[in-house]
Every structure is written in structure tokens, then in C-alpha cells.
Image: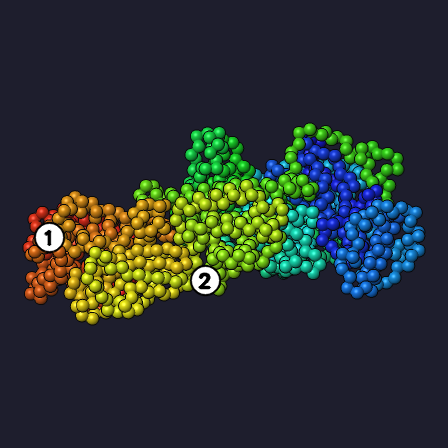
Amino acid sequence: MSGVTSATGSASCRFAQYFVVCGLDTETGLEPEELAGESFEQSPIRRSFKSKVLSHYPESTDRSPFNRDAVNMLCMPRGLSFRSQADSRDSRFHSFTVARDDGTHSYGFVHMYYEEVTSAQITAAMQTLHQMHHVEHHSTSSSSRSTSSASSPSTSSMDSLVSSLDESDAPSLAERPLMACLGCTSGSFQPARDTLYVSKALCLLTPLPFLLAARHFLSQLHQAVTSHAAPPLPLESYIHNILYEVPAPPPGRSLRFHGVQGPIVCQQPGPEELPLGDYPLGEAFSLLGVENLVRLLTSVLLETQVLLYSQDYQRLMTVAEGITTLLFPFQWQHIYLPILPAPLHHLLDAPVPFLMGIQRRDGAQRSTLDLSNEANLCFVDIDNHCVDPPEDLPLFPDQLELIQELNEVLLRFGLQPYGGATTTMPAPAAPPCLSSLVLEDLMEDRRNGNLGGEELAVLERLQALARRCGGGGMAGGKTLGRAFEEEEEELKAAKMNVQLREVFAGRFTSMFGRYEEFVIHSAPDLESWLCNREGTSNFDKGSFLSAQPATHLHFLSRFLETAMFSSFVDSKVLSRWADREPLQRMFDKRLERERLYNTFEDDPGNRHYRKCTVLHESVQAMERRLLKADHTAIHPHLLDMRIGQGRHQQGCFPRLQADVLAQGHHTNKRSLCQSKLLDPSPSAVTQTQRGFVEGLLRECRVKTRRMLMERMGKESVELGQGEANITGLQENRLIHSLCELLERTWGHGLQLKQGRSALWSHLLHYQANEEKMESPSNADGGLSEVGQARAWIHLALEKKLLSQHLKLLLANHDLIRQLYKPYAFLLCEEEREQFLFHLLSLNTVDYLCFTRKFTSISIPYRVVITPMKKLSIAMTMSNPWVCVSGELGDSGVRQIPKNTQEIFFQCQNLGRLSTLQLGQENSGLLAKCLVDCVIVHNEITGHTYRFPCGRWLGKGVGDGSLERVLIGQLVSPGGEDDSGRWTGTPPEQGSPPQSGRTGSLGSLELSSVQVQEDTREAVNNLVKHFHKAEQERGNLTALLCGEGGLVRSLEQFLLHGFKSSRLFQRSVFIWDFVEKVVVSMETADQMGDLLESTELCDSLCHYANAINASPRNIGKEGKFQLLVCLGIRDRLLPQWLHLLAECHLTAVQYEKSALVRDRAAVHTLSRVLHTLHEFPITLETALVKGVDL
């Protein structure tokens, strides 16, 4: 049973906070709205004028002080508008939101209609403006090409005319004939002929978004004003009731209160339900389409700048509020102004993420907007059902499956899932007479006691509708059937809202179901956490990403860097010492319920899409509340009013009696600070822009510090000094974030821009003036302006020239003053210098961001072959060639010109270089060369790679190889002399030197313990390689074939204790021993004396013979290297090692102390090699080319 409740306490528990009337102030007259951007060539009746807050009640409240300027701007964002009796004067509804500095919001609901102007002074002023417009327009059309400044009246001249006009001047002005002209035909005005109307706004401010209830209340209030008959009570009674006697419904309850013409029901979700969301999501989906709305939501989640664009203010609010309600459990942390009034258009320059909306002027397009930063902008043209997201926007996880599920929900409610479709397809209403008969029959059944509980609830609704419609109809022509149909549509929209939001809540529950496992609680108490908050990581992002599906990583790696996710994690950490935030508490309870039913999959990296399973249950509680109200508010009643007050005058909203609307109110001196963003005064604008400048500098400091810490942490991992805490994907995200920061910085206060990229526009202007700075714009013709700017940033960062280039760019002060407004960040010298200093710190670490990001561009390479300098005799090579390989492919065979040791060629980006094949033709014994190294230089990035060799290339010398596979290492920028010193990136493994590979003399110097340790270390490096994230793994070929690699360590193992009959022990090759073993096995097999496993022996013989049969002449060292690589790839190497150890030739070729004759050592090495069998090893083409195994 519903109870009667009242709201006599504080404003925080009331349904409404303020009632406001905005319109024309007849005392101040007509003041043009200068910031509306309208031309004076328009007819005055089509122009905008400044509105004023005519009255608001109460004067102020304790927790929400009244912001007069903000409310006035948002009630009438375009100012006052005038109409004549010949124009359309339909009333309009829109809503808005007002944010405060503490993050809380108030919601405003506005019913705007046109009221007849009764002031003779205003009518005369409008006539005067029309005469001035006619004279100016006539003189302009008759004169020959006069300047626009001479042909347009100034704002100050009109102001002075209107303000000096007296009512006594009206008759004389009216006597002057108004000649028809081309410019006046669209909006002429003559007092004797026309009736003048002006817009007026009735506004209700509430602490919660009670959209439907507030709209019904204001609509009924307006209908009472325009009705022929006076309302039952003065309007003050209804306004006093809504302000002071109607409480906000408690959580999980519904409330019925009374408007002028009938009851109104509102409700609030319970603690276990999604927060209140009255804005129709179905309309938002219909306006944009499902795919576009998911794309918009992705942009909002990644905190891009979002700009909504529509002629209808309520459409702006519907899309903005709809998107923010879908963010649960996260909350938007930045500028939120779904309706941006003209005086606040300077906020479009804000260099921070924002979600704002501006009204489209008649016939205007996006190109007419003055947008300084479009590189990271998501532009939403609501009227044309179009979403233009920023470049490189990742897909939402499981986007296709999500769109399909949303389509199914929309179709169940009769909506088409494509933008621009009609919102609903309601069933035809029953005839009014039939509705009345049905109602009479139901009332008769009630009197006879033939109705149950549900039937009684339906009857109460029908009776309420009947009273609202006045029996059979009402002034607006609404019948009982139509009213019942509208209520059913509202209920359907509310149910659809809940189900659509549940779908998205289910997706976030699936993605972040185990987020608590990755929250880092490092601070012992709240005070220490607050003191070290900036430098403390509260979430293990690397571990979290490693547990996610690969298809989700692009989105998640960027989302984890957003302020909304950081705030969410901070709230979780704070819950140790304080109460949890309501949204987080609700989300955590949902996760607990999911765990209770064990719906989370054991392997999150391979999770499958699961549709929401609670769609039906989620709407039941809300539907029950709306069908039967839990509480009823006090009815409006007659107040103690003065005699004659409240007299009804049709079409005119009365001047309310202020004393009765202020009764029962107590003002608390403690109040919250109002947001400076909504203050259009010059001082507030300056303060706001100054805050943006300080925020950019602070963000630059935090980002560069984070990039340094993460990069250095990664490098210490490569040196074996720590554990991995970042993946390559995260590093790419940090660099992408730096690009966004630079674009927002260069876009702040920009007034002269070419294209969508502010930074690229500045570079083009600078290049036109100076022609100094390099540009990668010709590297890839497919790059957009934004892409070219990002390529430039990546290249400058990789070359350690970013700070230097930007400093050079900013040295042209005249150009900066020409391009930027005075408040721009780039004109703040001190902050600009600190900004460059922070960027300079990035030079202490090495990046390959350009090389790895822009993979399709063409890169020029220069290759130089360096022979041994210590040899004085001339060395010759016959038709030498090279083939350079990297992460992204190889260059193909490139012939080196005759009589040179250098080649220059251009090919598609090879990425980070790994191997180089060096060879020559088989042209006799004279063609031989002892190669020291090969140098490869990237002409774009400036990187130099050194490929050590230290061996002969030629027939009849060394191992007789005509082709070498060399392992490269990136030379530090300091040059070869500094290559051994660590400069931020650890030295890489190169090709093994000659001394250890070509003889056993060096191996005898190594103890058996050292050889075994080197082997275990080589295998351990391979294991660590595969345990890293895929994006973070280094060069596998270097770990296999480089110095200290697996091939080198196994060679040392097999050389240990090897006997040699050669005099100087200089040319001992393990491949010779392998060939002898193979021949011995094949002979024993033919004789039937083979004791070992025939299958293993066949595999070793087959691989060795295939390598020998290869057309490549890679020498004995190369053949042994290839055998080891193929054996470890095909998981045969440990068994082969046992075959070699047990062969009878081993006792002949090796000393008794040799490791290969030590069964324990061989067994241990075999077990160590077995650990590599669980990893998929893929060999480079350069290693296995020519061998079909």
C-alpha cells in the first residue's frame, strides 16, 4: 500500500531544486547576442537577443547554489528568438546538465514556448531595427561595391538606439513607410499588421535525471497557461508543491505526485540495479545506428575529444546521456557539456578530452566550424546519422557479436537497428468511445468486488489517465486511448533502456571480471598512498594484458591508460580505508554473483562471447514500480496568497508571488564552488585557459616520466636485472599517447590551420618559411595529414631529435604569433621551455617506433663490406651479393657492383634487421676474402647495423664457404668505438668470432664446468624468450646462432676434448665428425650391424645428407649451424646428441675427459634441451633456404 510522503527537509532529498523562468527583460530592452555568430544582413526578427533569468525559486539551496549565468545560457543557448503570427510557434523541450567542481551534476529540463509581447517599447524597438535594416540593405544594394564595414551597422549603434528609444517615439516611427526589399521579405514586421511573439523558457532543475517526470510537469504547466479555463489552483501551488513537498523517490521505490492536469510517476532503481537512466537509448540507436553508436562508445571509452552536432538540443542530450549511461561501471572524467552555448565556444580549443555538443545552424556544415584540433576528434553528425572517429580507432572487443546482440534487443522492441530509422511502430489505439465503455465496465466490476490485485492496478492507471484526459478528451485533443498508448510506449522505452544497458554491463563484466587480481595494494596507509600517488602504479597492466585475447589487446592497452580506468582503480584502492563508490560497489557485487555461478572461463585468453542472460529479469523490478507507485506525495494545495494574485490570463505566464514560493526555505551559508567552465566572463575564460596550459605541462611531465620508467624497466629486463612489466603493445600505446598530447598542445589556441592535424599544419607553415626541417611525407603516399604528423613524431623520437626539432619549430616567434591566439600554450614561454626539457629527457633511451610502426614505407639502405684491415695483401671477390633480412621480411639478393665493396638499394621497410647473407660466385681459388664485418645503414632513421664475420669467404680457404649467414647488432649512436658501452639499450648478440669456432685450441682453455654453464645459459635465454609476450620477444636467430647462442655452446661442448691430427689445431670442424658418424651409421645399417634405433639414425643421416645436397655453399660451419637449428625445430636434437655420444667413433676422436664421453653430462644436456620442446620454433628463411626438410 502506498504511503503519503513529503519533502520538507534539505534540497538534496527533494525531487526538484529550482524552478526558473527565462525570457525577455522589458526593463533592459533588446540586446543583440553578439556571440551567436549571426549576420546583420538577417532580418531583425530572425536574429538572436540576450535573454535573462526573470525569476527563480528558491533563492538558493544549501548544497547546490544557483548559477544564474549558466542556467540562462543553457535554458536559451541561442538567446531570445522572435516570431510573428505568420511564423511557426511550436513549443520545444530540451534538457541540459550543469556540472560542479566536485564532479556532481544537476539536470535542467526546459519547456520553451512563444508568448505575445505586450511591451510597446519592445515592439517599437523591433520596428526601429527593421527600419534600420531596410535602410542599410537598400543602400547596400543601390551602391557600387561598398565595403562591408561601411554597409553594416555596428552592434554598439543598435544598442544605443534601442536603449535610448522611448515609448513616445513609437508613433512617429510607425508613421514612416517600410518599403519592401529583397532582404526584408523573409522576416518583415509592422506593428499595425503583425503580432510580435518572443520565446520564454520554463525550467526545472533536479539533482537526478528525472527526464519524463519533469517533462510531463512542465508540459502540464504550459498547457494550463495556454488553456481557456483557469487551472484548479494558482500556478504557485503546483510550483511550491514540486519544490518543497515532493521528495525524490527512495532507491528501489516509485513515487506519484500531481501536476496541474494529472498524476505523474517517477522511480529510482534499487542498489542492485543499474543507476537511473531516463534518456531514451532507443532514440540514440535509431539516430545513429548500432554500429555507429558502438564506434562512438569506443571513442568515449578511449577519451578522445567527442563533438556532437545537431539542430535539436534534445538530440544532443539524448546521445550524450545515452553514451555516458553505457559506461557503467566507469565514469567520464573530463569536460562534459552536451549543449555548448555560444558564449562558451572558446572551450572548443580545450586541449583535453571533452564530450560537447553544439547546435547546427541552418544549412551549416562541419567545414564552417572553427575546430583547432581534429587529429583526435570524434565528430558525430546526429542529423545525418554519421560518426567520424579519429584515425587508428581500435575495434571494441567482440564488436561484431556485440552488434548482433544489440540488434536482437532492438528488433524485439520494434526498432530498426540502422541510423535514421523510425523509433517505434506502436499498435493503433482503441477508439475513444470503446475505451470509455471498457473503463465503465471495469469500474462496475470493482464495485461488485470482481477485480483482483493486478486488475485493480490496471484500473487505477486507467482512472488516472481518464482524469488526466478529462474523461473523453483534453485541450490538446488527447484521448484516453492515446494517453494509455503513450504510457505503454514510455514503459517499453524504459524496459529497452535497461536491457540495452545490461548488454554493455555484461561486456564489461566479462572483460574485467578478474580485475581485482591485478590491483596493486602497495601503500600501508592512506596518507602514504596519497603522498606517492603520482609515481605509484596501482594496476599490473602487463600481467592483465597477457591474460586477454589477442584481438582485445589493441583496445584494452589504450583503455588502461585512460583517466576513467585510473579513477576506477584508485577507487578500488581507496576502498581499503573508506567506503566504496556506489558504482564500484554495484559492479563488485555483480562480479561476486558471476563467480558464485562460476560463469567466468578458466582461460580468459580464449574466452568466448556470452550473451547477457539477465535481460528479462533486469526489467521486472522497474516495471513493477512504474505500474504501481510505492509512495504518493502531498497534493498541491491553496497557499496564503494576496487577493488578485494568480489571476489567469490565457497564453501569458503570470508573475509569481515570490514570498509564498520562498516559504519553508532555509539557506545554509556553506555552499559548493561553481564550475568556472560555465563562466563566460573574460577573467574566468583567462583562468580556464591558464588551467589548460598548466594541465598540458603537467601531462607532459607525467607522460615522459612514465615512458622513461617503462622503457628503462624493459631494458633492465633485457640485461637480466628485473622482471618484465611492459609489452611492446603498451609501449606503442605510450608513444601514441605522446602523439595525442603533441596534437592537443599544438591545437590549443590555433586560429590558422591547414587540414586536420595542428602539428602538421604548423610544420607546413614553417617549411614554407624556412625550408629546413625534414619530413617523411613522401615516404608513404597513403598517409593522411594526421598520419604524416605521427610519422614525423615517431621518426624524430627514434632519431633522438624530437625536442631539437620542436625547439627549432618554436624559434620562429613571428609565425607562432600569426598562427595562435594570445592564450595558446605555445605563446607561454616558461611553460614551453619546460615542455621541451621534458621531451629532451626521452633521448636517454632508444626507440624503434618509426621502424616498427610504419611498415609499408620504402626505405633506402646502404651496405658496406669491410675486409680485415690487418691483411696487407689484396683480397678479391667474384660477383659478391648480399641479402638483408629483418623482422618484416628480406631485401632479396642484391648484387654488389664490380670493383666496389658498397651497394645502395631501396626496398620496403625491413623492420629491425636481424641477419645478412653474404656470398659470391664459385669462380676459382683466387676469389677469396677475409671479411671483418658488413655495415648496413638505414638512410631514413640513421640506424647502423653491424654484422660481424671474422672469417674467410672463398673456396679452398677456411671451411670453404661461399656464403655466410651473419647475425646483426644495432650500433649505438656514438659509433663503433662506443658500441660496447651501454647507452640505454643493451648490446645485442652478433655473429661469433673466428677464434672460437675454427679450432679446438680455444675450447681446451675452457673448463668443462664453463662449457656446461654456457650451454645452460643459452637454453635458458631461449626459454625466457618464449615466456615473454609475443610483441616483446627479441631476435630468435641471434639466440640460436649468435655469440653465446645455442649453436656456439653446442659446438664448444662437442669440441671439448676433441683429438686432432693437425699440427696447428687451426681447422677443426665438428661437421667433419658428424659426416664420419653418418657414414659409419649408413655402413653399419647396410651390414646389419646397427645397434642404435634405426629411426633416429635414419633421421640424422637424412638431415645431414639433405644439408650436403643443398645447392648453397655455406661451408662446414654453416652446415653444422643448420643441423642444430633444424634439430631443435623438429625436436630431434637431444636424441641426436645421444647417437653421437654412443657412436664407436667418439671413443676414437675424443679424450676420455671429453664431455661427450661423460654420460652424466650428455644426459644432463639432453634434459636441458628437452625443455625447448614445448615451444614452437620458427626459423628465418635465411637459415633454411635451399633445404627442403
Q: What amino acid does circle 1 point to?
A: Phe
Regarding residue 602, the answer to whether it shows in the image is: yes
Q: Is residue 1034 left or right of residue 126?
A: left
- Which numbered marker is on residue 1058? 1
Of mark 2 and mark 1, the one earlier in the sequence is 2
Q: Residue at x 7, y 56 (%)?
A: 1063
The residue indicated by pointer 2 is 779
Front-most of residues 1177 and 507: 1177
In the figure, 802 relative to 640: above or below? below
Q: Residue at x 91, y 54 (%)?
A: 174
The amino acid pointed to by label 2 is Ala
Along the horizontal axis of the image, is 406 left or right of 79? Answer: left
x then y, percent, for residue 962: 21, 65
**Residue 542 appears in view:** no
Image quarter of the C terminus: bottom left
At numbered mark 2, what does the secondary structure look like: helix, strand or loop? loop
Image height check: is 321 above or below 949?
above
User: Against 512, is 753 above or below?
Assistant: below
At which x and y percent is residue 1070? 15, 57
Closest to the observer, 977 or 512: 977
* Left or right of residue 742, residue 997 in this image: left
Q: Considering the numbered disc 1 on the image, is that residue within a helix, a strand or a loop? A: loop
Position of the N terminus by quadrant:
top right
